[in-house]
Image (cartoon, rainbow, N blue to C red):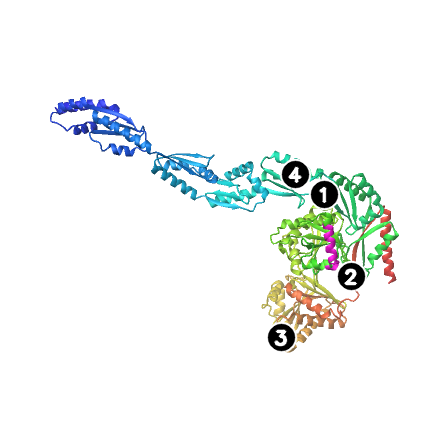
Amino acid sequence: MRSALFTRIRRIGSALYPYRVAQYLIIFKLLDILNWRKDVEGCLQHFVSNISVKATSLKSHEHSHILQKLGSLQNILMKTDLDSRTVYIIGLTYFVDKAIMEIERLECDDSSQEQQMEIPLSACEAFLLMNSGIENQITKQVKNVKMTMDLTEYKIKLLGCEKALISAKSIISNERYLIKERLVSNLSPERRYLIGLENAKKYLSKKIQASKALCFIDTSSLDAVKLCAFTEMELNKSENILLSSIVEEYVDIQGDFAGSISPTEYSPMFKQIESKYPGLVKIGFVPVEGAVHVVSVVDHSRSTVKEVRDILSRSQVFETVDLYRPCVFRYILQNRAEEIKSLSRKHNAVSSTNSKIFAIRVSGKYDDVVRFRNEIADIIQTIHWSVHHVSIPSRYKDTFPDICSAVETQIDCTNDIVNLSCISEAESEARKVIVMAGSLKYVECDVMVVYANIQHKPNCRQSELVVKAAGGMTIIKECKETALEDGKPGEWDVVATGAGKLKNCLTLLHIIIPDLSSDVQREQLEIAYHLCFSKIERQRFRSIAFSVTDKLSLSRQVQALAGTTKAYFTSRPWSGIRTVVFCDDRKSSHSFLYEFMSSRPSCDCLLEGHFKNDFTSHFVKTGENWDTTPRINLSSAFTFNVGQVMVHGILGDITETQVDAFVNSSNKFLDLTKGAVSQNILIKGGTSLEKQLNSTEKRREMDKHGLVVTTSGDSCQIPALFIIHVDATSVRRTFSKVNLAWRKMVLKCLQKAEQMKLTSLAFPALGTGSLQGNIGATAGFILEAVEEFVKRKPVYLNQIYVVVLEQSVLVDLHNRIRDRYIDNMKLWNPDYEEDVCADVLICGRSQDIVNKAAQRIKTSLYAVQTDT
């Protein structure tokens, strides 16, 4: 019977299979519901006739609470399909229908509980939340909520039950809290205006997006641009892009608008340029600064500025000032003045001359000015000129300019004296860079460069001294007048004036530096220095002198000046500038000297260092090996005469000095193992020197006379033929008479060299040990010994060297010698007179006249010398 029963159960389960209900579970559950009876057959028949299976769909998004309420009903069995949101109900027909009605009622109540919520947003919040993926975030974290974003009204709309809406709102609030803001206020009004335009804002947004940053640009404020982002890193990125992508530039108006079209007539031309790049370019006049202001995105900046300059150059009235060599300028005024006036009328240009700075000013339309200047250049090309070098005794230095001026009145020519200085004729052939310590106002050159503030007053000590010597307020007034005539100068402009009362230069150039100049860049200085070179090149000057100002960084100034000088000499081998002088305090001059050496100029020039008691010279050649070429050694030597004997002070190793003999400070045992110099002599002297030192005969001689001579053998690496060893220990024992003992020892060495018929002898800095480093005492006893030796009228010995290892010792030694003899000059050669060299530039209408003038200058100079 049981097997038959289960057969019937399987058939019923098969009938229910389409409803996706587990067969055995349903049957046995039903048996339990129907109160299992002993009459199984009757039960099954009753079950089959009363069973009902129905399915209904759930419309609500959140249906778990509905199923929970239905689960409390009796006499039914439910199975839920979550994928299709369908519930299957099995049971007696009455109970199944009742459950279906209950589900529909609960569904109706649930739909009436769904609510709508609107969250207002600002523009930046709407942009950031929309692009941050918040909709996906809410969908994943909160079920049964529908979210939409209205970008026109800047709102978020939520649809769902109250509990779900609260959860979604909480997520949105957290995201809004993370938004950070930053105000960018360091923008000009024009840049803020351009950023506010739609196209410019889209351009910036694309650049920010390309940098993988999410940021909103708010331009609603008139004072600043506000950036909004989720992180500080995104704000930093966006601010950098904002500041670098919108650039502004001023295109200076070089001339005047008088006689040309008015500024308002330029507006259509500028609007035409703006229309090429709609919303990305803004162009406007700045009348106060005399410039056109161009603001654009960085991609179009260069092309926009070029178009603006082209428009200005075609219609603007330009004014230029051309400087000329004084003699060229004077020749033009004397012989071609009418021709210049006719050129002005021919080209509809206005021209004037300035005899103070030797310049011609011309104003007019761009093309007219260019044609006028070209024809002036053609006139200059017809002038014959040549440079003649003269060398005269220094006592005729003040007379020479008068001689040249007199020649101008006798012959139809003009002339200038160039580079009147104490430089030899051989050295004057090369370009020179001269570095010296001292006052700039005493430098002899064509042009001096000074520094001035925006009020045209000198702003450093060197410039004050130069301007004061030139005429003080007179020069400042002239600078202001020249600046007003040329247009108000800006920072880093260069204004030229006359030299006033200064007789050692022709023109002053004033570099206008800003008042607050702590952040000055090297490039700005290089532009100003290059402008100075260009101005004197146009005027055909040949020498220029610079200093530095304490208002700016010393290192930047010397780097900029050294770099500009090197670049100018390298790029213009044809340049007429022959001499560049740097004159300031010793520290600044040393800095420039070494900076110029380290800059490795790619041109031939003579680099000279002029310092107190010192003159050093080094010829720099193109292609030199800078790894092996030594730099200039300051105070590397000095020389003076004591009668017929020449005394030299040099820096170096005494064992490598090219002399007949040198003196070594030793002891009575001839022990050279003590002391660095003695050990060096012993090593280089080899076995031959060692044998001589160990001989009994030499030691007896040292003990008797305090002096012994050794010779250099085949194995000796010392160039000197002899070494004179002296017993320094015997000198130290004299205590209070050390100076006298050393003087006698030096004299004994000199007499020994004369006796041996030697022509040259070198001494170390003797006595620095026993005299506790007193260089003055050493200089004293050496000079006293030399003076006494000279009185004995030596025949052979005429060259004496004092060799030291340290530069400071050599400088001190030199100063002590000068201090001892500079007053009475008794050891200096009284017959020596330094020659003064100069270049005379002569201009005339023919080469014959130029040569005739040169010959007349030489004849007049010779006549003055013979008369005196």
- 782, above or below 349, in the image: below
The answer to which quarter of the image holds residue 794 is: bottom right
Q: Front-most of 799 and 834?
A: 834
Q: Secondary structure at mark 4?
A: helix
Q: Which numbered circle lies on residue 256? A: 1
Crowd tier of the residue under label 1, counting other residues whose Cα lies within 10 Å: few below 14, some 14–19, many 20 or above: some
Query: Which amino acid is tagged 1?
Result: Asp
Q: Earlier in the sequence, mark 4 or mark 3?
A: 4
Q: In the rendered image, which residue does mark 3 sit on?
A: 732
Quarter of the image that includes the N terminus? top left
Residue 855, image x and y in percent?
Answer: 86, 52
Q: Which span is picked out in magenta? A: 468-483
The residue beneath circle 2 is: 834
Q: Mark 4 belongs to which amino acid? A: Lys
Q: Residue at x 22, y 29 (%)?
A: 77
Q: Residues within 10 Å of mark 2 (few under 14, many from 20)?
A: few
